[in-house]
């Protein structure tokens, strides 16, 4: 039997700590269990919602009866040393923190710019997470995934549709595992990672529950710049607000609710559209 919990407080599964309850959350331990759940979603005509660290997920209030699949129990991590480089085989639930520890130990190059992102491998691949000019697709080789019909598929990076913070997994597919390649480096990788973490700490409101960047950066200007110009830096609706430290970061000051959050987003989107004629595209994934 697949592990599950009932009436799960979804705010615990989202870093902004807002949301209602999930009728059930499943915690599969192997690929066949994920396949089974995806087939079940077809039979029951319910959407599948994969959950990683929850750092880009925002849940509605009330009781949600989707097929929630947490990757918490998919944490297998192995690697193969090829001399000049190392290949890592990572199940979806492996956290970036775990990868960073390994990267530091072997002084590997290619992951340092991504190091401070609070992500699981599955969430990062699905989102094509990135920072400091790098994205996970730069180091990705291939992905084992399960399509919407429950079939296991293996795709090379080049076969996967992807762009800035977008991959086709957002429409179709559960990322089961990923293979990445990292080069043994001559640089001091731990030092670079430390610098990136300091920079994040300086610019991001890491002391409050947050869901990170709310909007993708439009081609015209960074979303944070537009929000600030539109008067949203530090603007609150009840206990939800755009951070004073970083205008594109939504934060929860304590008892923030989903309706406060949604109203604030709609206000920001309408204002930016009226002032600059730009449609802000949400990066955060809202589950209703
Ligand atoms: C403080 C902070 C800083 C951040 N900084 C950055 C940054 O620098 N760069 C950046 O790109 N992002 C950043 N983010 C956003 C977030 O960390 C990334 O999008 C990350 O990749 C999400 O990973 P996750 O495991 O938390 O995914 P979740 O938030 O759990 O899920 C995100 C989306 O991916 C889907 N998903 C999750 N797992 C899978 C899976 N196995 N298969 C298919 N779909 C799946 C979910 O259903 C959801 O749609 C930041 C967030 C926070 C809170």
Image (cartoon, helix red, strand yellow):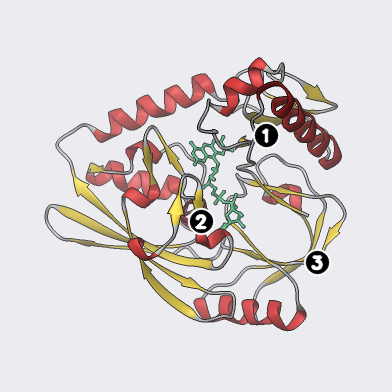
Label 3, ligand 1: CB separation under 8 Å? no
Q: Counting other residues with Cα less than 10 Å from the Cα at mark 1, is it few (<14), some (14-19), or many (20 or more)?
A: some
SS for callout 3: loop
Distance from disc 1 to disc 2, alpha carbons, whole Å, reads 22 Å
Quarter of the figure that contains the C terminus = bottom right
Q: Position of residue 103 (x, y in %)?
A: 30, 45
Which residue is at a point 61% across and 36% down the rendered structure image? Answer: 215
Q: How many marks?
A: 3
Q: Are marks 1 and 3 in contact (CB under 8 Å)?
A: no
Distance from disc 1 to disc 3, alpha carbons, whole Å, reads 25 Å
Label 2, ligand 1: CB separation under 8 Å? yes
Residue on which the image places disc 2? 126
Q: Are marks 1 and 2 in contact (CB under 8 Å)?
A: no
Q: Looking at the image, is 158 positioned above or below residue 103? A: below
Q: Which mark is residue 209?
A: 1
Q: Is residue 258 left or right of residue 38?
A: right
SS for callout 1: loop
Residue on which the image places disc 3? 65
Q: Counting other residues with Cα less than 10 Å from the Cα at mark 2, is it few (<14), some (14-19), or many (20 or more)?
A: many
- Of labels 1 and 2, the one closer to you: 2
Q: Counting other residues with Cα less than 10 Å from the Cα at mark 3, is it few (<14), some (14-19), or many (20 or more)?
A: some
Distance from disc 3 to disc 2, alpha carbons, whole Å, reads 22 Å
């Amino acid at each position: 039997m697949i592990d599950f919990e009932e009436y799960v407080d979804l705010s615990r599964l989202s870093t902004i700590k807002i949301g209602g309850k999930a009728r059930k959350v499943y915690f599969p331990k192997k690929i066949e269990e994920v396949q089974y759940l995806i087939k079940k979603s077809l039979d029951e005509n319910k959407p599948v919602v994969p959950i990683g660290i929850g750092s880009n997920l925002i849940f509605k209030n009330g009781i949600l009866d989707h097929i929630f699949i947490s990757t918490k129990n998919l944490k297998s991590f192995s690697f193969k040393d090829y001399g000049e480089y190392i290949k890592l085989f990572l199940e979806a639930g492996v956290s970036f923190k775990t990868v960073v520890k390994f990267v530091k130990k072997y002084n590997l190059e290619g992951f340092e710019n991504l190091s401070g992102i609070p992500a699981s491998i599955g969430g990062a691949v699905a989102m094509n997470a990135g920072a400091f000019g790098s994205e996970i697709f730069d180091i990705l080789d291939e992905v084992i995934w399960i399509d919407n019909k429950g079939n296991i598929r293996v795709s090379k990076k080049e076969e996967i549709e992807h762009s800035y913070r977008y991959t086709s997994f957002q429409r179709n597919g559960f990322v089961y595992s990923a293979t990445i390649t990292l080069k043994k480096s001559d640089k001091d990788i731990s030092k670079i990672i430390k610098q990136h973490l300091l920079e994040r700490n300086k610019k991001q409101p890491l002391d409050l529950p947050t869901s990170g960047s709310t909007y993708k950066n439009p081609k015209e200007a960074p979303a944070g710049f537009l929000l600030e110009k539109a008067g949203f830096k530090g603007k609150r609706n009840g206990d939800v607000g755009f951070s004073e430290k970083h205008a594109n970061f939504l934060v929860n000051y304590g008892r923030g609710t989903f309706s406060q959050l949604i109203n604030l987003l709609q206000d920001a989107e309408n204002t930016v559209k009226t002032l600059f004629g730009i449609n802000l595209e949400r990066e955060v994934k809202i589950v209703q």
